[in-house]
């Protein structure tokens, strides 16, 4: 039995528990689980993306509760913190100059937008993340909301694929 078949057969509560760490939006995992079974990976991902397209400011605020500042060690032992630690592993925390630049840019971002900077860190170097952070500081509120939602969707899909082995 492949990973998708196992996911399709999980009891409802176990399937929701499996997907809940993907994003701190409580309604998302149950909505995705309710539309099982999925014929294939493409069908699952299409449904996940369709649900994500409905996200707005309220969902972004919910999700932000589980995202640490980029470049800082996520605190706690929760699954979200563990995933963030893994995803940010490419950020060299021993590079003092990069760490200081990220701290400064994070503070500017938070002062401007009132939330932490959100980016899919996996596959990006610390320098690339810093560059994106600095570029996004030039966004207006609406542009930045859309950029943050797009990054949240990328992070969620990455975690979904990891959760179910898709």
Image: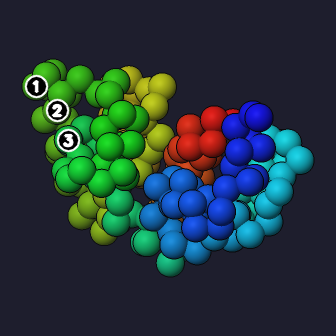
Q: Residues within 10 Å of mark 3 (few under 14, many from 20)?
A: some
**Residue 85: x percent and y percent?**
30, 38
Q: Does 18 sit left or right of 83 as displayed?
A: right
Q: Residues within 10 Å of mark 2 (few under 14, many from 20)?
A: some
Q: Does 36 sit left or right of 156 as displayed?
A: right
Q: Name the quarter where the C terminus is drawn.
A: top right
Q: CA distance from mark 3 to mark 1?
A: 14 Å
Q: Could you say which is closer to the camera, residue 83 or residue 91? A: 83
**Residue 59: x percent and y percent?**
52, 72
Q: Which mark is residue 73?
A: 3
Q: Tell me the residue at 40%/35% (across/down).
A: 87
Mark 3 or 1, closer to the camera: 3
The residue at which mark 2 appears reads as: 99
Q: Could you say which is closer to the camera, residue 125 or residue 140? A: 125
Q: Tell me the residue at 52%/61% (across/down).
A: 17
Q: CA distance from mark 2 to mark 1?
A: 5 Å
Asked whether the beta carbons under mark 2 and mark 1 sit within 8 Å of each other, the answer is yes
Q: Tell me the residue at 39%/63% (across/down).
A: 64
Q: Name the quarter where the N terminus is drawn.
A: top right
Evaluate whether residue 10 shows in this view. Answer: yes
Q: Could you say which is closer to the camera, residue 162 or residue 6? A: 6
Q: Residue furthest bottom?
A: 58
Asked which secondary structure carries label 1, the reply is helix
Asked which secondary structure carries label 2, the reply is helix
The residue at which mark 1 appears reads as: 96
On screen, 34 above or below 83?
A: below
Q: Tell me the residue at 69%/70% (across/down).
A: 31
């Amino acid at each position: 039995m492949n990973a998708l078949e196992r996911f399709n057969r999980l009891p409802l509560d176990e399937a929701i528990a499996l997907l809940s760490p993907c994003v701190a939006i409580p309604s998302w995992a149950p909505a995705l689980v309710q539309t099982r079974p999925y014929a294939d990976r493409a069908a699952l991902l299409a449904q996940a993306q369709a649900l994500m397209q409905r996200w707005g400011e309220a969902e972004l605020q919910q999700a932000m509760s589980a995202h640490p500042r980029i470049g800082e060690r996520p605190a706690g032992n929760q699954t979200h913190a563990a995933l963030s630690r893994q995803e940010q592993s490419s950020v060299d925390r021993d590079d003092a100059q990069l760490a200081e630049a990220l701290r400064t840019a994070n503070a500017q971002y938070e002062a401007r937008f009132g939330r932490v900077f959100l980016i899919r860190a996996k596959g990006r170097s610390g320098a690339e993340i810093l560059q994106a952070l600095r570029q996004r500081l030039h966004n207006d509120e609406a542009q930045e909301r859309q950029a943050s939602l797009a990054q949240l969707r990328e992070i969620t899909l990455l975690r979904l694929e990891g959760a179910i082995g898709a």
